[in-house]
Image (cartoon, helix red, strand yellow):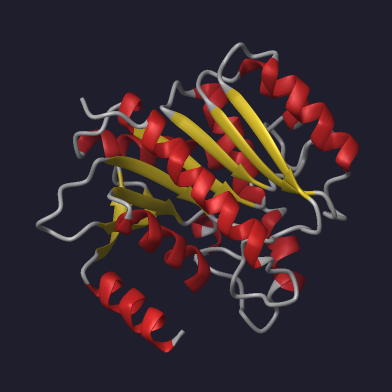
């Protein structure tokens, strides 16, 4: 394990990390592959309710290692923060998440898609990946913009909306404008399996290539390796491999 950790840290030191103002408006963190390794495409990475955490940045690093230019918007920037107080963790995350609006979320995502376009990656070379509330944002964004693909890790607000201006996913999923992959846990107390089943059917009605995978024995945030109480290594590894395969198939060079 120590050797694997050392190798991972060495890989991540090769990546280029910068904080930017996407389109001059949205604070965001950009993590790119090594300078001698041109990106194969762009990925907008959407935070879970805690914000721009070390966990989320590790996801961006993993995508950079796979060859993608990543950008993560700081969705809480209107409140002057990037991350909730780690000491409060989820207790502080839920009220902070409630401060968001559909208009603000859409503006931030659009700025990040625009930043990738400015870097040379148009819609056919740009995907979006989100976790928890970010999974909700990823699907919603894919109904507004014809991206190469969208991946939702346990995105909630399936049968009722989370924010003004963002309808429930069951309502918007039939309007998907590109391929979508959903990854859910069957023991998620926040997202009932009835909602998951309904979302699978609603997404299929879009006519786009869609797939929803549900994992027995996994609950909400099963990919969060920084939270041992919820992390499920088996489902997390399978979901991540599916994500990389999905991106490899959908994000095409120009």
State left or right for residue 123 relative to residue 103. Answer: left
State left or right for residue 152 relative to residue 4. Answer: right
Q: Residue at x 51, y 34 (%)?
A: 150
Residue 135, how many percent across, how many down?
62, 44
Residue 25, how many percent across, how many down?
36, 47
Q: Quadrant of the C terminus?
A: top left
Residue 139: quadrant of the picture: top right
Residue 199, how many percent across, how many down?
76, 29
Q: Residue at x 40, y 31 (%)?
A: 249
Q: Residue at x 34, y 51 (%)?
A: 70
Residue 213, how many percent across, how many down?
69, 39
**Residue 215 higher or lower than 9, as above or below:** above
The count of marks equals 0
Q: Which of the two residues, 27 or 38, is positioned nearer the viewer here? A: 38
Q: Which of the two residues, 166 or 141, is positioned nearer the viewer here? A: 141
**Residue 207 higher or lower than 8, as above or below:** above
Q: Is residue 160 visible?
A: no
Q: Residue at x 33, y 52 (%)?
A: 66
State left or right for residue 140 relative to residue 72. Answer: right
State left or right for residue 80 relative to residue 202. Answer: left
Q: Residue furthest bottom?
A: 2
Q: Is residue 45 visible?
A: yes
**Residue 170 higher or lower than 110, as above or below:** above
């Amino acid at each position: 394990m120590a050797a694997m950790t050392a190798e991972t840290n060495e890989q991540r030191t090769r990546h280029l990390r910068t904080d930017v103002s996407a389109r001059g408006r949205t604070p965001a963190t950009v993590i790119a592959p090594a300078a001698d390794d041109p990106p194969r495409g762009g990925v907008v990475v959407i935070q879970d309710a805690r914000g721009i955490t070390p966990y989320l940045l590790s996801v961006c690093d993993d995508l950079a290692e796979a060859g993608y230019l990543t950008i993560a918007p700081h969705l809480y920037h209107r409140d002057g923060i990037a991350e909730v107080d780690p000491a409060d963790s989820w207790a502080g995350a839920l009220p902070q998440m409630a401060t968001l609006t559909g208009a603000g979320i859409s503006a931030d995502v659009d700025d990040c898609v625009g930043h990738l376009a400015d870097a040379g990656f148009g819609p056919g070379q740009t995907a979006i990946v989100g976790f928890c509330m970010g999974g909700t944002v990823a699907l919603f964004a894919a109904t507004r913009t014809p991206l190469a693909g969208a991946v939702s890790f346990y995105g909630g607000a399936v049968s009722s909306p989370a924010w003004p201006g963002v309808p429930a996913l069951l309502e918007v999923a039939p309007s998907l404008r590109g391929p979508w992959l959903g990854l859910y846990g069957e023991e998620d107390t926040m997202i009932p399996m009835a909602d998951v089943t309904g979302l699978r059917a609603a997404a299929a009605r879009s006519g786009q290539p869609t797939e929803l995978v549900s994992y027995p024995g996994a609950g909400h945030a099963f990919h969060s390796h920084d939270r041992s109480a919820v992390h499920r290594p088996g489902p997390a590894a399978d979901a991540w491999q599916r994500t990389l395969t999905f991106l490899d198939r959908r994000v095409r060079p120009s």
